[in-house]
Image (tube, rainbow, N blue to C red):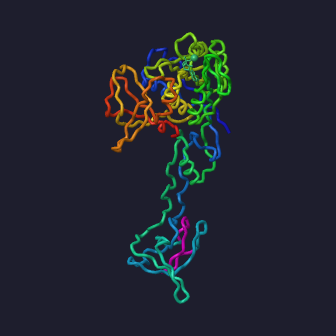
Amino acid sequence: MSDTPTPSLLNDCFLHDRDRLRHDEALEILRTRMSTVTGLETLPLEACAGRILAQEIAAPRDVPLFDNAAVDGYAFRFSDHDPAGGFFRLGARVAAGHPVEGPLAPWSAARIFTGAVMPEGADTVAMQEDCRVSEEGGETFVIVPAGLRAGANRRRAGEDLKAGTPLMAPGQRLRPQDLAALASIGQAEVQVHQRLKVGLFSTGDELRRPGRALAAGGVYDSNFFLLKALAETLPVEIHDLGILPDRRADVEAALAAAAQRCDLLLTTGGASRGEEDHVGAALMSLGHRHMWQLAIKPGRPMMFGQIGTTLLLGLPGNPVAAMVCFLLYGRPVINQLAGGAFLAPQRFAVPAAFSVKGKKPDRREFYRGTLVTGPDGETRVTKFERDGSGLITGLRAADGLIEIPEEVRSVDEGSLVTFLPFSGMGLATA
Ligand code: AMP
Ligand code: MG
């Protein structure tokens, strides 16, 4: 089942090539100038992991539906119980899924198992490990220890969710624990957003996919694999659109065709001002280039525009810059276009195990950071020592990004810096 997509977003007149946009301004533009483009579909719950919810959900009834035992043991009426310890006549046997009819007989305890409905009148459960069972005169008794409190080991109806409680709202990403909650209220199908169709292009005459021979001066296309895996942490459907040559006409034809089929085009490389950089020129002739050139490092040439109602995010070609720009800009953009929030990374203040002198003002810098815990037990963050934005090694060594604001010119060892863990940007740890 599919709804008509809500119309796309952007007003095409908001920003024209203002040079060197600051990070926060760029984020604000991206956040406020676009909205959801994906349609809706109803899926069985098991197909909903990682999808973005498109409906309100409230608990239709209590969870659990009835008072039940939290342990295997013996259920009794607390008011029948001698707080100094005592015994009960052994009565009914109640297993999970097999409730018993009628009230508990006076001065008796029911044999009960975890999850079984508490017999009427019973309010307390003694754990089987703490009880002793004995036979006397042909009758079975259970001896319950001292020290139990009224209501011990009983789970109350509605203690997880009360009937009518608002549970989930549109726009939230369905995590494993959310699916568990939906199942617990008996929801078999959920209305979610369709996955965002993301077209991925690499650009550059030097690039080849692994498995093909490299020509002289050739480089393997790392960014396709990097960006596909990064994007797939979000609810997307990836269209591999291959490698574009550094020829304007080819770039233009390929972008025009892809814009017909995709909601978002992600390109890498070819975004600078060089003669061999054709993505910007093609974008301007096919549609609009809304911004490029950010006051950040790495990742200065980052482009954002649209062809018809399809958006284009032109990421830098250097792998480090491509990953940093994807996480900072691509991730929130994709999630918002797909019906969710404009995701902000988690940020923590962590003491620096490095120092920096002579940072350029007026630009925000992002270093690759690795957490280290010293013999004193304190966790600090080290900076990958080499700066090159082609170094995939530094991305692999890092646990996240260190963010140094525009106005800062130096960092002293031991001072607090802002750390953005990759795990707080949707990535798994190694
Ligand atoms: P460009 O932005 O096209 O000037 O590329 C900048 C640098 O990144 C060059 O050294 C390119 O070879 C490299 N590069 C561009 N695209 C990729 C890619 N998909 N995989 C690996 N390296 C790339
Ligand atoms: Mg290139």
Q: Residue at x 65, y 29 (%)?
A: 239
Q: Residue at x 31, y 29 (%)?
A: 412
Q: Quadrant of residue 368?
A: top left
Whole-percent x, y for residue 420 in the image: 43, 34
Instruction: Name above or below for residue 360 compared with residue 65.
Output: above
* Tag count: 0
Instruction: Name above or below for residue 1 compared with residue 329.
Output: below
Whole-percent x, y for residue 213 in the image: 67, 23
Residue 334 or residue 200, whichever sits in front: 200
Is residue 175 visible in this depiction of the protein? yes
Whole-percent x, y for residue 123 in the image: 47, 70
Judge whether residue 197 is colored magenta.
no
Decide if residue 389 is on the left or right side of residue 54: left
Quadrant (top left, top right, bottom left, bottom right) of the N terminus: top right
Residue 33 or residue 291, whichever sits in front: 291
Magenta stretch prevailing secondary structure: loop
Quadrant of ligand 2 in image? top right
Judge whether residue 110 is colored magenta.
yes
Name, please, the residue furthest toward the bottom. 137
Q: Quadrant of residue 264?
A: top right
Magenta segment range? 102-118
Whole-percent x, y for residue 206 in the image: 61, 18
Is residue 106 visible in this depiction of the protein? no
Name, please, the residue furthest toward the top. 275
Residue 234 or residue 101, whichever sits in front: 234
